[in-house]
Amino acid sequence: MDLRPEPLPPPVSQERQEQLGRQIGRIAELARDAARPDRLKVPDITREELAEIVRRIMQADPELQDATAEEIVDAALSYRPIAL
């Protein structure tokens, strides 16, 4: 039996479905991030270990190819919080 349009839910456009899909994906990503355990703190990590970590990140993100791993690590190690 075919129903009249009145008792049926309103149609959802393809654009709206895609928008909802993106929002669901963002929520799923936030849930994954929230479910992760706290990051492990490595005592006495060396400059060489940090440089290797940065190299691996740079391989994953080509936009970071402008700086050397050592330059990025040196900048990170030189950071000092600013007292407010």
Image: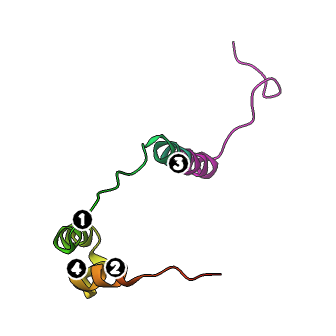
Work out which quarter of the rendered image holds the C terminus and state it.
Answer: bottom right
The crowd level at tag 2 (other Cα within 10 Å; few <14, some 14-19, many 20+) is few
| 27 in the magenta segment | no
Residues at marks 3 and 1, CA–CA distance in whole angstroms: 29 Å
Work out which quarter of the rendered image holds the N terminus and state it.
Answer: top right
Query: Sequence-wise, which precedes: disc 3 or disc 1?
Result: 3
User: Residues in magenta?
Assistant: 1-25
* Rendered location of residue 16, percent (x, y): 64, 49
In this orientation, which residue lies closer to the viewer: 83 or 4?
83
Compared with residue 2, is residue 67 higher up or lower down, i.e. above or below?
below
Residues at marks 2 and 3, CA–CA distance in whole angstroms: 29 Å
The crowd level at tag 3 (other Cα within 10 Å; few <14, some 14-19, many 20+) is few
Give, as a three-letter code, the residue at label 4. Answer: Ala
The residue that label 3 is drawn on is 30
Residues at marks 2 and 4, CA–CA distance in whole angstroms: 12 Å
Left or right of residue 75, residue 19 in this image: right
The residue that label 4 is drawn on is 69
Residue at the limit of the structure toward the top, as seen here = 1
Query: Sequence-wise, which precedes: disc 2 or disc 3?
Result: 3
Query: Sequence-wise, which precedes: disc 4 or disc 1?
Result: 1
Give, as a three-letter code, the residue at label 2. Answer: Leu
Q: Identify the image quadrant of residue 76.
A: bottom left
Query: Sequence-wise, which precedes: disc 4 or disc 3?
Result: 3
